[in-house]
Amino acid sequence: MEKKWVVPLFVSTLFGIFLLRSLNMGLFSSMETINSVLSLLPSKISGDNRDSPVIVDSKLSSEPPAPAPDVPRLAYLISGSKGDLSKLWRTLHSLYHPHNLYVVHLDLESPAAERRELAARVANHSLFAKVGNVYMITKANMVTYRGPTMVANTLHACAILLKKWKKWDWFINLSASDYPLVTQDDLLLTFSKLPRNLNFVEHTSRLRWKEPHRAKPLIMDPGLYMTNKSDVFWLLSKREVPNAFKLFTGSAWMALSREFVEFCIWGWDNLPRVLLMYYTNFISSPEGYFQTVICNSPDFNGTIVNHDLHYISWDIPPRQHPHTLSLNDIGKMISSNAPFARKFDKDDPVLDKIDDELLHRVKQWVIPGGWCSGEPLCSDVADELKLKPGPGSEKLALLMDRFISRWDFVALGSPQLLLGSGYHRKRIRASASLLP
């Protein structure tokens, strides 16, 4: 009886050796997978829990959370001249969002006291100083609209944005006479659904009266070498329209992709520099330089949306400056679905109406948004990526569907380029996904 344990001990020892060798040979490498499969099978359990379902990890059974919108970053240039300090300051507040970037500029014609006052306001503004996304060009440039100095100032602001901030998606140039018709949350939500390589540039190759009056005359801009603003000088000789590239014209106001801005500033192709020299002697070059660069570039001429994102009231044919907007134009502004309008007089009552009914902006402060916190409201930033869009986002969606769904806005180049740079290469059709 004392030796009965020998046989069981011998058998268990042999079984243990077999198990160890099996583990070394990797025969049980898939046991975890097998057990996980078996665990999903219903088991018969005695007692009250006999028919209980097998408990599965909640990570396997729950629906994945809806992805947050990939919020883009907009980079603004807001420029003004003599007497525009208060207008520029109001426009900046009506456009402000902590996720965006802002470059402000009062040109050399504005008094030094106005420029110092603007610099002090930016530095001492509690929210701007805390977030650090407003930059003032303190070394002012001379800017004349009809000459190339406005183009030079725009390129200067682009270069500052590229140097100071590594990540942004679109550059938008505005003046102190512009004003938004939607909140920045509306605009950011709409742009979050768009390909990041789109460029909003109003353009046409039909120069018509502009060919003899703007393309052929030669001018000299005194703003290139003088500190006092004066009109351009007209030269006696004229020139022919070039045949090395095609001329385009359009609006001086636009939204440019970062990729295209880098092309204009860094210029790995010589086209932006050649055209910059050509437009040095061109009447109203801000209405032609960027249009001609992008439309003559094979890499970018399929990314153009033919709209300047503005409501502007012009004479027919248009004159040098558009109509000044008032309360009588509010209906047309709203029905245009455009995110911006121009131009406005200082503190016109129509601006108060836009603040009250469209932007919900408290006087002397920034527009509210999903990011707002603190006391008083919007004195601090809770989450700069949290968006709280309103009715303006629906209007913007209608505008985008109207232009991006059109087949002809990429007629200058291959439609397949439209969704390049990481996007699926296909044409954009009218998309209900743009609607909230």
Image: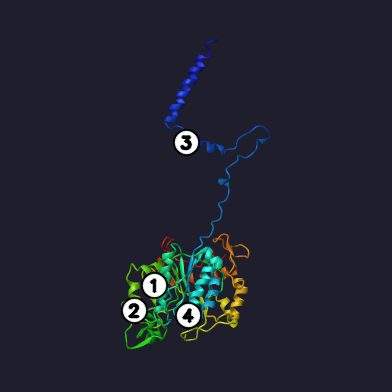
The amino acid marked with disc number 1 is Ile
- Residue 291 in sight here: no
Tell me which residue sits at (39%, 72%) in the image.
294
Q: Secondary structure at mark 1?
A: helix
Q: Which residue is mark 4?
A: 111
The amino acid marked with disc number 4 is Pro
The amino acid marked with disc number 3 is Ser
Q: Which residue is mark 1?
A: 294
Placement of the C terminus among the 4 image quadrants: bottom right
In space, the residues marked 2 and 1 are separated at their CA atoms by: 15 Å
x and y, in percent, of residue 387 in the image: 57, 63
* Residue neighbourhood size for the residue with mark 4, other residues' Cα within 10 Å, grouped as few (<14), some (14–19), many (≥20): few
Q: Which residue is mark 2?
A: 278
Which comes before the other along the chain, label 1 or label 4? 4
Which comes before the other along the chain, label 4 or label 3? 3
In space, the residues marked 2 and 3 are separated at their CA atoms by: 71 Å
Image depth: mark 3 or mark 1 in front: 1
Q: Secondary structure at mark 3?
A: loop
In space, the residues marked 3 and 1 are separated at their CA atoms by: 58 Å
Q: Decide: is 49 above or below 330.
A: above
Q: Secondary structure at mark 2?
A: helix
x and y, in percent, of residue 414 in the image: 39, 68
* Residue neighbourhood size for the residue with mark 3, other residues' Cα within 10 Å, grouped as few (<14), some (14–19), many (≥20): few
In space, the residues marked 2 and 4 are separated at their CA atoms by: 32 Å
Q: Secondary structure at mark 4?
A: loop
